[in-house]
Amino acid sequence: MSTGGGLLAEAVFTFALAFVVYATALDPRGPKAIAPFAIGVTVLVDALVGVPLTGASMNPARSLGPAVAGGVWADHWVYWVGPIVGASLAGLVYETFFMRRGENGG
């Protein structure tokens, strides 16, 4: 996979995970009872799709340990920038299109 493709993939995987966390665990109106299940299923699907592609980091800290242990730093920035961009976009999208909708009564 190209570096750009890996960056996009990591951003998409993290976007999905962060969006589900916002929707189930953080939104006061969210279905908190299913949050652990929904988050777990999202991680499972992200991993099934992403591990063969990029390793499906979804978390910069999760990529740091293997990089330190293995001494492999080639394109390591992808595992930082992708998740940061994906999570930031998820927060922005959720806040803009879902959280404010409830505040305005509809």
Image (cartoon, rainbow, N blue to C red):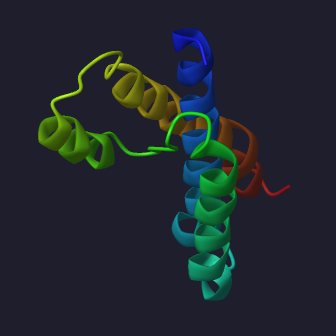
> Which quarter of the rendering shows the C terminus?
bottom right
Name the residue at 57% across, 11% down.
Answer: 4
Could you tell me if residue 29 is visible in this image? no
Instruction: From the top left corner, tell me how far across and down residue 35 is, in percent.
Output: 60, 77
Quadrant of the rendered structure where residue 29 is?
bottom right
- The number of discs equals 0
Q: Is residue 38 above or below residue 14?
A: below
Quadrant of the rendered structure where residue 53 is?
top right
Could you tell me if residue 66 is visible in this image? yes
Left or right, residue 30 beside residue 76: right
Quadrant of the rendered structure where residue 66 is?
top left
Q: Is residue 40 above or below residue 66?
A: below
Instruction: From the top left corner, tell me how far across and down residue 78 is, in percent.
Output: 41, 21
Name the residue at 44% across, 44% down.
Answer: 57
Q: Is residue 18 above or below residue 64?
A: below
Q: Is residue 89 above or below residue 24?
A: above
Residue nearest the observer in this picture, 29 or 89: 89
Instruction: From the top left corner, tell me how far across and down residue 8 is, in percent.
Output: 61, 22
Residue nearest the observer in this picture, 96 or 8: 8
Kindly give the residue lying farthest to the front in the view shown: 70
Instruction: From the top left corner, tell me how far across and down residue 73 is, in percent.
Output: 24, 22
Residue nearest the observer in this picture, 98 or 79: 79
> Which quarter of the rendering shows the N terminus?
top right
Kindly give the residue lying farthest to the right in the view shown: 106
Kindly give the residue lying farthest to the bottom in the view shown: 33
